[in-house]
Amino acid sequence: RILSLATTVLLAASTLAETPLAELLDQAKAGDANARLELAIRYRDGKGTAKDDAEAMKWAHQAADAGNAGALDFVGFAYLRGAVVKRSPEIAFGYFQAAAEKSAQAAFNLGQCFFGAQGTEQDCEKALEWWTTNGFPTFGIATVGTPDDAPATIEKLAAKTGGFGTFLFLAHN
């Protein structure tokens, strides 16, 4: 059997994305977890401020500690990649697990951990479960089948998105 996953990622502009940095800092210091995550993203990417990975992780950890699912995924991904922090798939897996019910991106990443034995034992069935229940339905479409099933999946996704932002993963066992 072939696993064929087609998805689209449509990036919606955050209302915080246009907030001036000083105002965002005030909101974050007042405890706003969404503002803290937005600061983490800005510092990571160097948008509107100098790129500063340590500052990005500081704000991401504060937002994650408040239970922000996007921040939990952000921190988990840093541990998975070994960016700014020492690489630890086991820690990343824990962050993804904590966020997966509320974050499609974390659900996708949790599926990736199960599929690639990153921080956990390999479990392709659990990977498929996370990809098809919480991860991909939010982003697009997931199909498990043969190569003959892939064109129909791609056509459905293209119709849904107008052909924008689609990509395909293929794996087999």
Image (cartoon, grey):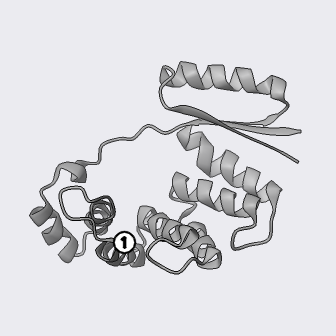
Choose top left, top right, bottom left or bottom right for residue 59. bottom left
**Above or below: residue 83 compared with residue 153:** below
Between residue 70 and residue 120, name the one nearer to us. 120
Q: Is residue 117 left or right of residue 141?
A: right
- Residue 87: where, in percent of width, then height? 57, 77
Q: Which amino acid does label 1 sit on?
A: Ala
Question: Which image quadrant is residue 107 in?
Answer: bottom right
Q: Is residue 63 left or right of residue 162?
A: left
Tally of marks: 1
Decide if residue 98 is in sight here. no
126 to the left or right of 82: right
- Residue at position x 22%, y 71% from top? 28
The percent position of residue 65, horizontal first and vertical second, equals: 40, 79
At a point 55% along the width and 31% down the height, the residue shown is 166
Residue at left offset 61%, top offset 53%: 108
What residue did someone put label 1 on? 60
Which image quadrant for residue 171? top right
Q: Quadrant of the N terminus?
A: top right
- Please state which of residues 91 and 45 is positioned toward the viewer in this rendering: 45
* Residue 166, visible in the rendered structure: yes
